[in-house]
Amino acid sequence: MRIPHDPAPPPGDEASTRIFRAAPNYYRYLLFLWALKTAFAVLIVVVALVIPIVTASVVLVKQGQPWGLALVLFPLLLLLLDVLACLFKLAVLRLEYEKRWYVVTDRSLRVREGVVTVREMTVNFANIQNIAVSQGPIQRALGIADLRVDTAGGGAGSSTHHGHQPSENLHTAWFRGISNAGEVRELIQQRLRLLKGAGLGDQEDLWHPASGPASGVRASPGLLTVLREVHAEARALRRVAEGAQ
């Protein structure tokens, strides 16, 4: 199986690139969930197949049917395949933990996760609408959390399952299993404020409703400044034209 290469930085100043990784406790969290699923899968095979077939085999042998012992091979084979599948999932789990990337520049962020199915999402800061931290009881005990970044069309209402994976959403990027969720959130918010101060975008404070009849129209402070200058020049030209008449 080909392991995906490391992701390239998203758009922005390369010198501002920050790379974050899932915490070691996140792998322990995944191991805990894997152990629960494995125990449940093995229990299902044992209860539904192994015990009934082994019981039937013992009965057949007691009745003088020695071929009944061959029946035991079938559930044992299924149990072996089940264990091998669980071990394969464990190997994939380790690779998915190691190949999980969260990259942030001064203009955007990129999230890459998965090795069997690779999922990569790039978000421009101009499209970010909400940043939130979610943390379940097990994550709280391990000192990790998930950082959710909602973009246009996503919103804070994106649902989250109580298990390992929050619900997939094309408008939501997840920094899963990080131990410094507050630091990452503050970094993104700080760079959003820098973009706002540079007049390159706005998320909350940059846009203000215009007054007058077109109250539904919104304009940025930069645009309002340009409009005021145009208005002043138009008035000056008007005074010059009136004086020339």
Image (tube, rainbow, N blue to C red):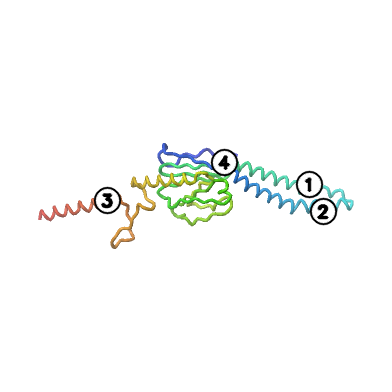
Select label 4 or label 2 by which is in front: 4
Q: Amino acid at mark 1?
A: Leu
Crowding around mark 3 (Cα neighbors within 10 Å: few <14, some 14 to 19, many 20+) is few
Q: Is residue 21 left or right of residue 214?
A: right
Q: Assess whether mark 4 and mark 3 are in contact (beta carbons under 8 angstroms).
A: no
Q: Earlier in the sequence, mark 3 or mark 1?
A: 1
Q: Position of residue 92 (x, y in %)?
A: 61, 42
Q: Assess whether mark 2 and mark 3 are in contact (beta carbons under 8 angstroms).
A: no
Q: Amino acid at mark 2?
A: Ala
Q: Amino acid at mark 3?
A: Thr
Q: Earlier in the sequence, mark 3 or mark 2?
A: 2
Q: Position of residue 195 (x, y in %)?
A: 37, 46
Q: Which residue corresponds to mark 4?
A: 24
Residue at left offset 63%, top offset 47%: 34
Secondary structure under tag 4 reads helix
Q: What's the distance in space between the residues labelled 3 and 1, CA to CA?
A: 82 Å
Rendering quarter of residue 118: top right
Q: Quadrant of the C terminus?
A: bottom left
Q: Which residue corresponds to mark 3?
A: 225
Q: What's the distance in space between the residues labelled 4 and 1, CA to CA?
A: 40 Å
Secondary structure under tag 2 reads helix
Q: Assess whether mark 2 and mark 1 are in contact (beta carbons under 8 angstroms).
A: no
Q: Which residue corresponds to mark 2?
A: 56
Q: Position of residue 183 (x, y in %)?
A: 46, 44
Select label 3 or label 4 by which is in front: 4
Q: Which residue corresponds to mark 1?
A: 73
